[in-house]
Image: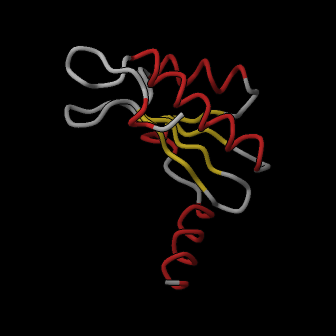
Amino acid sequence: MGWFSRKRNKTGAPSARELDAATRAHLEEFLSTRRGIEAFIEQPTSLNPATLLLIAHDGEWTRRSVPDVAWARRFARQHRLPAYDAGVIGYPQRLRDYNSRRRSER
């Protein structure tokens, strides 16, 4: 089902349940097609919601907004992923290396 074909609420935005299902589906697809994944939880700010960043063994990554930090921690625990607070630990070098490789390919 495409993003624009989902049923909308009165404001035209997808419901929280639809976003939760779409987020979960994307993250689980990433998990099923990569190996060595770690979860980095990014705290919400006044401008951005909480996010979950999954990083594979080779540095490939995906980031999705999540309802809250508890949701991200629960997702990581359910999938037996090591989870880190990105604001405390920082990001692994393999992420920066992956981004650098991608930029040089363009």
5 lies above or below 86: above
The image shows residue 35 at horizontal and vertical percentages of 79, 49
Residue drawn at 52 percent across, 18 percent down: 71
Q: In this view, does 15 lie above or below 48?
A: above
Q: Which of 34 and 18 is in front in this view?
A: 18
Q: Nearer the viewer, residue 59 or 24?
A: 24
Quadrant in the rendering for residue 67: top left
- Residue at horizontal 42%, vertical 27%? 6
Nearest the eye: 41 or 62: 62
In x, y percent, where is residue 59?
Answer: 64, 60
Quadrant containing the N terminus in the rendered view: top right
Residue 7 place in picture, x, y as percent: 39, 21
Q: How many marks are shown on the rendered structure?
A: 0
Q: Is residue 96 left or right of residue 60?
A: left
Front residue of this view, candidates 100 and 9: 9
Q: Give the x, y percent position of residue 21.
A: 54, 23
Q: Residue at x 26, y 33 (%)?
A: 45
Q: Which residue lies furthest to the front in this view?
A: 5
